[in-house]
Image (tube, rainbow, N blue to C red):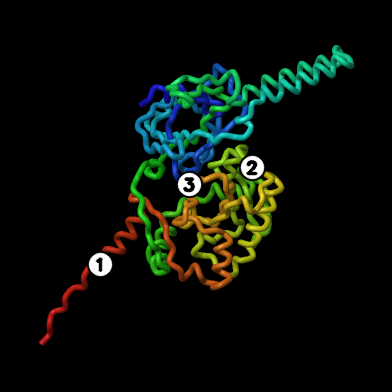
Amino acid sequence: MPESLYQLRTESVELGSTSDNKDYDERQRRQGQPASATSSKPAPESSSSASVVVEDGVNNPTSRSYDLADFVPVRILNNNSTHKSVSLLGHFVSLSRDDYAIIVLEKTAFTEGQLKNHKRHQTSTVTKVNSDDVATNLSENSESVQSSATGVIAAVERSFFSSTSQLRTEFVNDIYGNFLCVADPEVNQIKVTIIYPATERHIVKFSTQKRYLVEETAQDYRTVTLPHIQKEQLSLEWLYNILEHRKEKDRIVFEDPSEEIGFILLPDLKWDGKTLEQLYLLALVRQRGIKSLRDLNATHLPLLKNIQTRGIEAIKTRYGINADQLRIYIHYQPTFYHLHVHFTYLKHDPPGIYCEKSHLLTSVIGNIELLPDYYQKVTLSCVLSETDKLYGKFEAAKSELDEPEPKRAKVE
């Protein structure tokens, strides 16, 4: 285990580090409620712990204090170089030596603000202010000048292009150079997700494993998938907490209270709610009993169109992003079986946006308008992991079909 993993510094469970570890897949979307914490305020230099409210492995809300110095890694579950993230299994020895915890470390995206040279920009502004002040009354404005100068320092602390960033030379050859940059912690943070206590299901979910493309017919859904959902569905109490304003009320971006066509729009757990380049929101429908794409028919068109129209309007109002810059889609198979719609920025490529899993909302609406029971008849593709119980049930059903019929004894 790299020594640097033991030396991570937290900022409200968000780290500053040069560690190069890596991904997690489609989580995260509330299976067992992982706690994802971010902060724009630096923690005191002497502190390495943070209190966060989480949902534990049995969906019981608790308040815990996590100290990363007490986390002992057991093994790496998944190390993804593409998404620059890593999932680790281990123990918080200060909490329990028996209960497992999963920590997901993910490099955050660059923001436009971090890629500006604030010092150059602000210095010229301050210089101009000084000149103007001298021409009028320097002493009268000295306080505002000092304030501007302080602003320069604060801005510098949040840019890669500042004196706090240092280049370490790898090699230089003619006009080409490779370097490692040790940047200011304020612009080199790591997003941290903690699941504690983690169950065997969580461990399997976050582990690297083979995946398979399954073609699910309408008959397969009725005989294999639906019974599986009814038996294995995870608790949706966390979702009902949101719909009934018992939890996460302050995170709601938009709400339509209608029981028939209403929904709540809020940031997905994958998004920190601040980095616009990674915008990712979920629309949770208020109507209960719609499990997935398979349940949708013509009676749900007003609901789907309302989510599309009002979701786009809310995102435009709050974040200034137009409809033609949004990717709006429904997953199949979903991670949890209560209808929800994903809104992501086209600039961002989160897990689960590919054709074998995502169905654009415009296409879903169009298909139902063409054929009201389209999703009760169509064959749908889905990707399942080798340890997924549903995949095992598909394999078992296929084996039964492949078995030859027993020969009948010839009767004279």
Q: In this view, does 317 lie above or below 8?
A: below
Please tell me how crowded label 3 is: few (under 14), some (14-19), or many (20+) other residues with Cα within 10 Å: some
**Residue at 76% across, 18% down:** 127
The residues bearing labels 3 and 1 have C-alpha atoms spaced at a distance of 34 Å
**Residue at 35% across, 30% down:** 74
Q: Is residue 303 visible?
A: yes
Closer to the chain start, of discs 2 and 3, is 2
Q: What residue type is labelled 3?
A: Pro
* Quadrant in the rendering for residue 110: top right
Q: What's the mark number on residue 351?
A: 3
The residues bearing labels 2 and 1 have C-alpha atoms spaced at a distance of 51 Å
Please identify the quadrant where the C terminus is shown.
Answer: bottom left
Please identify the quadrant where the N terminus is shown.
Answer: top left
**Residue at 53% across, 19% down:** 166
Q: Which amino acid does label 1 sit on?
A: Asp
Give the farthest residue toward the right: 136
* Quadrant in the rendering for residue 369: bottom right
Q: Name the residue under label 1.
A: 402
The residues bearing labels 2 and 3 have C-alpha atoms spaced at a distance of 22 Å
Residue 8 pos. (x, y %): 47, 24
Q: Is residue 338 above or below residue 275?
A: below
Residue nearer the viewer, 363 or 46: 363
Residue 111 pos. (x, y %): 60, 35
Q: What's the mark number on residue 251?
A: 2
Residue 97 pos. (x, y %): 38, 28
| Residue 183 horizontal side relative to residue 128, left or right | left
